[in-house]
Amino acid sequence: MNAFITGANRGIGRGIARVLADAGYDIAFTYGSAQEEAKEAHAEITAKGSRCFYYQASLENPDVPAEVTRRAISDLGGIDAVICNAALSKFGTVLDGDISLLDYLYALNYRAYILCAREAAKDMIARKSPGNIVFISSTRGDRAYAEDTFYGAMKAALHLSAQSMALELAKHNIRVNSAAPGATEIRGDFSPEQLSRGAFAKNIPLGRRGSPDEVGHLVKYIISPEAGYMTGNIIKLDGGLILPGMPESDELYERLRQD
């Protein structure tokens, strides 16, 4: 089993790579600029007995997503699952925000996902092999926040694109789903104490942030045979963060931004 993950040198992507390697997947992944982190992730994955390839990729550039996906296909000998994860999380006001940020977020957080997924789907179809496409989105694609016009919109677009692609690719036995984490800790040891730190975490119904490995376990299930009847879904993993009963206030919003 082979999986290609964008942005797996740290945070959620690394958690996904770690969990899939434990499950027996060979891994190819991209990183943006943090080469030392990529080397550490490579060492962590190979120590689990998996083959691992990693590539520097500036996915915001229009030709790069397809090129690096084809390279992963070649190195792995085909892709069974592509997990599009690399993204920049950013708040910014629509009134005087830098429009170049909008262009960048569109290119990295949306267009790159579609282009990587398209190239992987072509490989799956050519090999007449069932496969999985997973977009790592966010609950910010479902709930509106002030100053989240750009990033939140890209995540919402991924949700609809996953559903449309699921309809189009079902005849090829390719499943397309979106995993939507809420507040997730991306650095540290992910201990219960760390996940519960900060005022905002205490206002999440389950009282803590999620961990990258928890997202990894969700992805592992989504691409497993046990989830073989699942396609076109957006699966939240947020500790109840955006349930209708979650308290809302300007103060809590500021904690989300700063905590």
Image (spheres, grey):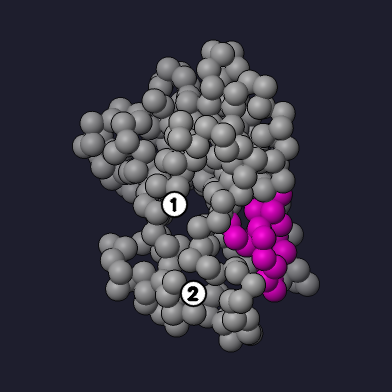
Q: Amino acid at mark 2?
A: Pro
Does residue 101 appear in the picture of this structure?
Answer: no
Disc number lying in front (1 or 2):
2
Compared across the picture, whether 68 is left or right of 22 comes to: right
- Residue 79's place in the image compared with 240, above or below, is above
| Helix, strand or loop status at disc 2 | loop
**Measuring 62% from the left and 45% from the top, which residue is drawn there?**
233
Most common SS among magenta residues: helix
- Residue 36's place in the image compared with 202, above or below, is above
Over which residues does the magenta segment extend?
A: 138-157
What's the CA distance linking mark 1 and mark 2?
A: 18 Å
Compared across the picture, whether 249 is left or right of 31 comes to: right
Q: Mark 1 highlights which residue?
A: 215
Compared across the picture, whether 191 is left or right of 3 comes to: left
Q: Residue furthest right?
A: 95
Asked whether residue 231 is drawn in magenta, I would say no
Find residue 202 and report its horizontal and vertical position in percent.
Answer: 44, 79
Q: Mark 2 highlights which residue?
A: 205
Find residue 41 and report its horizontal and vertical position in percent.
Answer: 31, 43
Q: Residue furthest top?
A: 127
**Measuring 57% from the left and 38% from the top, which residue is drawn there?**
230
Asked whether residue 155 is drawn in magenta, I would say yes
